[in-house]
Amino acid sequence: MQNSSRVFSDKLLSVAPKLVKDAIRIKEGQVVEVTLTGEARYIDILDAFTLRISHLGAYPVIRLNSPSYRRRFMETVPDKYIGKTPPHMVKWIKDIDKHINIVADAPTFILHHIGDQRKEAHREAERKITGQIRQKKISTVYVPTPELADYCGISFDQFENLLLNCLDIDYAELRSNCRKIAEQIRGKSRQISLISDSEFRLDCRLNDRSVMREDGRNMLPGGMLFFSPVETTVNGQVMIHSLNIGKSIVKKLLLKFQDGKLVDSQAENNHKVFVDLLKNSYGDSNSFAGIGIGMNPGINGDPDNRLFSFYSNQVIHIGLGSNLTYGGTNFSDLFIRLSVLKPELLINDNVLIAVTQ
């Protein structure tokens, strides 16, 4: 494992002020809870962000959420305490204006050896805290670490360069570009058409629904538009580039929708893996959730990157499953994003975005 001094690069140091001020947009007088999700060896990264927050006249509160501690907690704390919610945290969260989660660890923290009863008791205890946190303004920041590089299946140097290119961008320009594209999509009279692989067409309408703009305030790297069309207006076919499901890769996945429901699918390989994913999920897992447009100018192509592909400039994807948070009506335990092969996005048959990948 590489040490934190290698990970904590000079470029990340130089970008931190921009991220805090221009992207997350911390204001003077705010109380900002900053959590490092990762091991203590990355504490310098946490310090860099909290120091910039202090320079803006805000008040950081620092937390460490290490995988090693979480593992020991779940393994050793007595059953009678595992399900108790810390009362001081419930009160303390009310005073917080903004939450920033600095992610240094791969999102694969699973404790297979812990009993379901203990895990469920702990989830219930955390729900009172996470429920309040979700009502606040939350920002998630990915930072360059070997754990995240391994998760993406690339070398640390490749991951670091990719990530820092995504972070070190002009956020005012990103916000402007997101607004311009969103304005061209919104409106009752506009038919939205998605062409994939030159021959497959999917039509839908947004009507009164909004377009979510992820321009850096809530997710870093940022740069994405996502909108959920009225479900019953979604009809046609779309070809998916590839989809990672566990250790399997489903390639050239063709999906057919009727009134927003998936009615047929076929794939070049691993089709059953995709079918089983939907079958083993509850609710509207086979429903069209929305369309996303990557807007980050610091990354182009690379649809196979597990963390950043959907933010890649002009990469278009669709969502399947739950879309309640985007203004839709689908309810499910599943939400997946799927990159579209050679997409074109048309508004009233006029090309808005065309990408050859």
Image: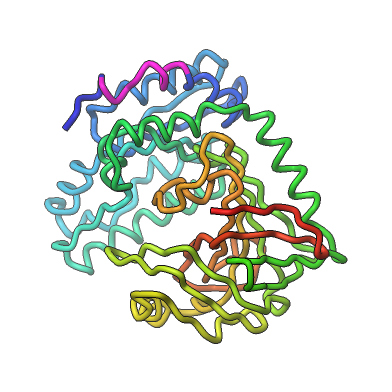
Query: What residue appears at the point 73 percent right and 77 percent down from the top-left corner?
Result: 233
Question: Closest to the observer: 235 or 26?
Answer: 235
- Dominant SS type (magenta): helix
- Colour mapping used in the image: rainbow
Query: What residue appears at the point 54 percent right and 62 percent down from the top-left corner?
Result: 341
Q: Identify the residue at the far top of this view.
A: 55
Q: How far across and down, in percent of the image, does residue 17 sit?
A: 51, 19
Q: Does the magenta stretch include residue 10?
A: yes
Q: How far across and down, in percent of the image, does residue 319 sit?
A: 55, 65
Query: What residue appears at the point 34 percent right and 20 percent down from the top-left corner?
Result: 9
Q: In which quarter of the image is the N terminus?
A: top left
- Please indicate whether residue 352 sits to the left or right of residue 126 in the image: right
- Please indicate whether residue 63 sits to the left or right of residue 320 in the image: left
Q: Is residue 16 magenta?
A: no
Question: Closest to the observer: 6 or 117?
Answer: 6
Q: How far across and down, in percent of the image, does residue 19 sit?
A: 53, 26
Q: How far across and down, in percent of the image, does residue 198 sit?
A: 63, 67
Q: In which quarter of the image is residue 40?
A: top left
Q: Is residue 12 above or below residue 316?
A: above
Q: Is residue 219 above or below residue 82?
A: above
Q: In this view, does 335 lie above or below 218?
A: below
The segment highlighted magenta reads 6-14
Query: What residue appears at the point 66 percent right and 52 percent down from the top-left corner?
Result: 212
